[in-house]
Amino acid sequence: MTSVNSLPTLDEVARVAGVSRATASRAINGGSRVSASARQRVDDAVRSLGYVPNPAARSLVTRRTDSVAVIVPEPDDRIFSDPFFARTLRGVDRMLAANDLQLVLLLATPGAEGARTLRYLSHRHVDGAVVASHHRNDGLADHLVAIGLPCVFVGRPWGGDRVTYVDVDNVAGGREATKLLVDRGCTRIGTIAGPSDMTAAVDRLHGWHEAMGAADLPTEAVAIGDFTEAGGEAAARELLDRHPDLDGIAVASDLMAAGALRVLAETGRRVPDDVAVVGYDDLGVAERTSPPLTTVRQPIVEMAERATRLLLEQMDGSAPAGAMRVIIPPVVVRRDTA
Amino acid sequence: MTSVNSLPTLDEVARVAGVSRATASRAINGGSRVSASARQRVDDAVRSLGYVPNPAARSLVTRRTDSVAVIVPEPDDRIFSDPFFARTLRGVDRMLAANDLQLVLLLATPGAEGARTLRYLSHRHVDGAVVASHHRNDGLADHLVAIGLPCVFVGRPWGGDRVTYVDVDNVAGGREATKLLVDRGCTRIGTIAGPSDMTAAVDRLHGWHEAMGAADLPTEAVAIGDFTEAGGEAAARELLDRHPDLDGIAVASDLMAAGALRVLAETGRRVPDDVAVVGYDDLGVAERTSPPLTTVRQPIVEMAERATRLLLEQMDGSAPAGAMRVIIPPVVVRRDTA
DNA sequence: CACAATTGTGAGAGCGCTTCCACATTGAAC
DNA sequence: GTTCAATGTGGAAGCGCTCTCACAATTGTG
């Protein structure tokens, strides 16, 4: 009951329960091979002493820490605005909680800070890692493979077949989104792509090119944004400046699309009549734009859960040897902008 | 160099360096009382073996874990939309990183899940805790005090003088915001308050009452929102329904204010000419509403950093005995809605 | 030149826990 | 009644590290 100084140890529990430390340990850890009466006495002792096992001592011998890192290698500003991260965290946490594992969040700003993250991982402070969204050349995948830490990426990583990952089929998503514009009769279709150091952005742009090629349409109208609303605004402005006659835009994220919609409204273009727009993500933003955004759904929470499940399999050794990949088909969500 | 199976231990480092384990340990831990040559040999050995200390073993003897929990006891949906959490995380992480501490994120959904969080904390998996935004009756403050874990709250906790916290003066903030409306000549001023189980919401409402009382204005027009945009929308609708003649609204958060602005636009009211609006938070949302929102700034990142600094003092014993509180004065930010 | 103070070092005792092993007990099988 | 497995139990060996303590080697002081 007293909480100051030196918490009760397993020895004390054993003494109070009148059993050996070994038996007490077994009783506490789901123990098989413990008589009902012993277990009962141990339980009582635990309760009356307020005993809680010392995780350091335990993990010293079990070689497990029962915690998992979520690594978010992202420049600060995006974390604030993008619903992506929060949802990823939620999906992972939900899965971990169900397995009595703790989530350790690593906010890995690139550069010198990144070294800190790598160091932490090397120390085997965690049993595994989920990497949320990573950029080219951050070396994370390589490092994780090198130290042999179980890990899963949410979103296709660069140099991708060495690690397990879960992703939406972004090429197909980009293609479908663009096709929607083609099918409604648009002929001058531009795109606002994401930063070219992220696979999701590259893949969606690739999909756009595929659809444009299939429809025999020109592919000059490309602008790059940074997945933020402000970035989308700037990109839209640039795009419309260069191609004032666009009648359709495929945007690589809803947040950017929201920015683009604002520019379209400002410049007196009606959506979708003058310019049709398709976004990407459908994480809550798309429902709130005006008009509500037609978009491609990324089931982030589900992806995160799936990824975490794969990680758990790696951690308990039940996963097959190589790197696995799970590709989820995209779903187009029709609202009012296309 | 090999990474599979059994990492190198301190013993091996010592052997390779030709010193005792004790000396190796000293050399590695900023050691005083180690000759330059010994230190050099140990450093070389560490490098060549790729040695990293085992944190479990270390914390077993030092009784420190070098990690700090951030507890976010919040229903899921808010975490996604509110910039508050991301910024808090960033402030805390920045401070922890500077002190070589790790951030362990505890997403504590209430109820059964809450028990998991409490259990984790009892286990002394962390050296301290920062609690981000807490609700009445979650018992967190009591529990933390009971187990004697160093902790700091960001935002005034319920039953507040038992734990250290950092907060903006929300009463003053609510008062100033309302006064702004009074001073510009509004006489029929309503408010959209936050949920009454959060101190920030209660305090801001209190400030509103103070300002209204001082100006001798009626205080019937109160609606309650949940700090989300959708909640603000609903509350605004209700408020205008009951009091169609309002000429000013003090809203307890920018997100809710954004919802309210939309309702005002929909119902054909001009802002600020017909109805003036003041928000609260200024975390990026306020700049993007149309028109841009006059609001009260909460310097969240700074608060989080301050809180973390206080926590660190508690952890290293340099803090004074009792519970401390830091109250930051609010700053009104004028834009176009009032 | 004797003595004390300082510095660097290694032996060894734990930190609190899990788990292997050996040793009773017991009950079933023949 | 003997033989064997199954079942509980405790002793004891670590897990990898830090840190106290005793001791040797060095330096400084009178």
Image (spheres, coloured by chain):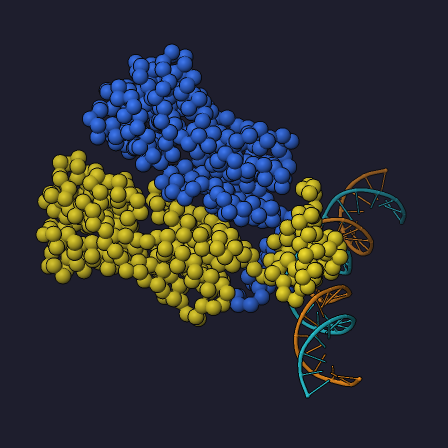
Chain colours: A blue, B yellow, C orange, D cyan
Q: How many marks?
A: 0
Give the percent coordinates (x, y) of residue A156: 50, 30
Is residue A15 in view from this perspective?
Answer: no
Res B207 visible? yes
Q: Is residue A251 above or below residue A92?
A: above
Which residue occupies 64% across, 50% down? B52
**Snapshot quadrant of residue A244:** top left
| Residue B149 image point, x, y percent | 48, 61
Residue sitting at x 48%, y 53%: B97
Left or right for B232, reference A253: left
Q: In the rendered view, does A226 fall on the left or right side of A41?
A: left
**Near-viewer residue (B186 or B119):** B186
Occupied quadrant, residue A228: top left
Q: Position of residue A76 (x, y in %)?
A: 41, 44
- Image position of B106 (left or right of A26): left
Question: Could you tell me which residue is drawn at 44 percent across and 22 percent down?
Answer: A206
Question: Which one is in front, A189 or D15?
Answer: A189
Residue occupying image coordinates x 48% and y 55%: B98
Given residues B188 and A277, the one toward you in this image is: A277
| Residue A3 percent location from the top left of the image | 52, 66
Q: Is residue A79 above or below residue B117?
A: above
Against C8, residue B280 (above or below) is above
Q: Which quarter of the figure is the C terminus of chain A placed in?
A: top left
